[in-house]
Amino acid sequence: MTNSAITPHEAALLKTMQRYWGYDSFRPLQREAMAAVMDGRDSVVVLPTGGGKSLCFQAPAVAMGGMALVVSPLISLMKDQVDTLRSAGVSAAYLNSTLSTDERREVMEQIRGEQLKLLYVAPERLLLDGTLSMLAQANVSLAAIDEAHCISSWGHDFRPEYRGLARLKEVFPHIGVHAYTATATEAVRDDIARQLGLADAEMLVGSFDRLNLIYRVRSAAGRMGQIQRVIEQHRGESGIVYCISRKEVEKTAAALVGLGVKAKPYHAGLTDEDRKRHQDDFLNDRAEVIVATVAFGMGIDKPDVRFVVHAGMPKSLENYQQEAGRAGRDGLPSDCLLLYSRGDAALWKRIIESSADPGVGDGSADSLDGALRALDGMSGYCGGVSCRHKQLVEHFGQPFSHNNCGACDVCLGELDLVDDALLLAQKIVSCVARLEQRYGADHTTKVLAGSTEERVLQLGHDRLSTYGLLKDQRTGDIRDWVEQLVSQGFLLKAGEYGVLHITESGRQLLKGEAEPKLLRASAAGSDKPAGRNRA
Ligand code: ADP
Ligand code: ZN
């Protein structure tokens, strides 16, 4: 890129970035995103975690007159963000439920005195009539909405209180409203703009390709041993281990401490104080490993996280991309290992359906459907046998051009593939045909394995020609292969019960015109080194 076309706005921004942050260039897309802010054009900006979203509104906020409103759901992190800005010399404050009456009064004074460049505010606080009418009197320069996917029930983290942000455009008709998120498919992107009532918003989507991250997926067999190996390969470096439940976090952290690893647990069940201390220990390298639930990481900015292990499957590719994306923010090679077992999807399904999970939003049919679809996408990734980078990048609606990324287990040739995959796959698909495409994966597996369970016998499925056709194989393997054939598009799961159907490519497979890949999953994981470091 040439510098010949530097606009006066850009010059002012570069000066601001240099003066307050010590940066002398834009990261990809920051230039465009900041131009939209300076010009007052509404925008939706999608950049991966670590892409530098905050600066997209912070630098313009400083360079422009007036005060920027920053809406963020992360109450626990507002203070840190504001402290960081202040220590850089930018006058900033926040308004949320943690402030005392006196503190709130002081912030109001600063707003009235036009002393602030940025005001962070939680959505529920912003939408109080008192707050809005007070801000309507202030000289507001722009509105920035962080974690903007929270407004869409199509996203993975719908928060009903975000819906009220549509009022921003009514109260402040003349300022630009800007939405920022790390995770948005095209549908979510459009939904964000629609829900916020943005006028002809500029859509800026950064590259999701994080080729410094080496993705691997393994069966969770021998879980602790696999986690331990990754940590050993990264001795003296920082890493995160994500677990699904608090109990798993505690168990895993304790086991690691027992092995002499400086590990700290982090989950919503700890006191604020413990959470904060463990987070600080990790950020300041007093702890090497943080073992955490999804509660950890939003807004965490540690550039040298060298590995992220998922001890269980996340509930969506959005979550996975965000959590794994906390590795290697400095651009250096980093390992992302996902350990999964089929039980994980079932566990998530129970959590989602009981709506005990706040990430599912308001529990409406819409968000429930979305959550279950997202879960299927995640399972598909785990059972997938095509390049992990390609799967992720394409999920986020971008084309992927590499033939061999050189940075995932598939492209590195580490998958333990079955030799006679076509024949095995034909047996499975024939069984689906014999069952008249009326049963799900579990039942189909039982018939193939020659189960003598009552239901199989009652239905007379022991008399089918495909009964017991795979009785020499492990039942767990057969069940995994069914998923893998689904994720490769030879079979399709339909309806609430996941009834298996044969697709067009499935029919070609029966004719021998396809190249399915099947993993020897139960054997994988225990005997191969996990998280081999390329650096
Ligand atoms: P995001 O919110 O997109 O996850 P952040 O805003 O936290 O990302 O930025 C990630 C890191 O990159 C931070 O350490 C930030 O200070 C740094 N950063 C952002 N923009 C620049 C830039 N133009 N030059 C150098 N470092 C930058
Ligand atoms: Zn690859």
Image (cartoon, rainbow, N blue to C red):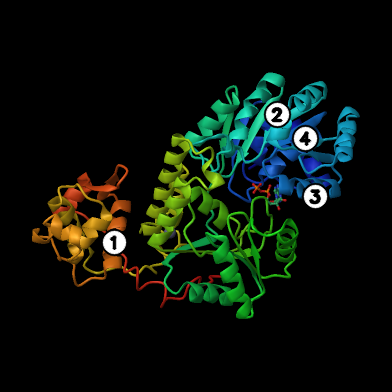
Disc 4 element: helix
Q: Relative to residue 411, is residue 491 depicted above or below?
A: above
Q: Find residue 315 and name its label.
A: none
Task: Give the distance between the C-alpha atoms of the residues marked 3 and 2, in whole angstroms.
Answer: 26 Å
Closer to the chain start, of discs 2 and 1, is: 2
Closer to the chain start, of discs 4 and 2, is: 4
From the top left corner, tell me how far across and down residue 450 is, in percent: 17, 66
Q: Residue furthest bottom?
A: 259
Looking at the rendering, in which quadrant would you find the C terminus? bottom right
Res 273 → quadrant: bottom right
**Amino acid identity at mark 3:** Thr
**Amino acid identity at mark 2:** Leu
Q: Are marks 1 and 4 in contact (CB under 8 Å)?
A: no
Closer to the chain start, of discs 3 and 1, is: 3
From the top left corner, tell me how far across and down residue 491 is, in percent: 25, 50
Q: Relative to residue 208, is residue 265 depicted above or below?
A: below
Closer to the chain start, of discs 3 and 2, is: 3
Q: Which residue is mark 3?
A: 84
Task: Please give the name of the residue rendered at 62% of the width and 34% of the height, measured from the top-left corner.
Answer: 161
From the top left corner, tell me how far across and down residue 206 is, in percent: 56, 43
Q: Which residue is mark 1?
A: 479
Q: Which residue is mark 2?
A: 127
**Amino acid identity at mark 4:** Ala
Task: Please give the name of the residue rendered at 44% of the width and 36% of the height, measured from the top-left corner.
Answer: 365
Q: Are marks 4 and 2 in contact (CB under 8 Å)?
A: no
Q: Which residue is mark 4?
A: 61
Task: Give the distance between the C-alpha atoms of the residues marked 3 and 4, in whole angstroms.
Answer: 15 Å
Label 3: how many Cα within 10 Å (few below 14, some 14–19, many 20+) = few
Q: Relative to residue 418, is residue 157 depicted above or below?
A: above
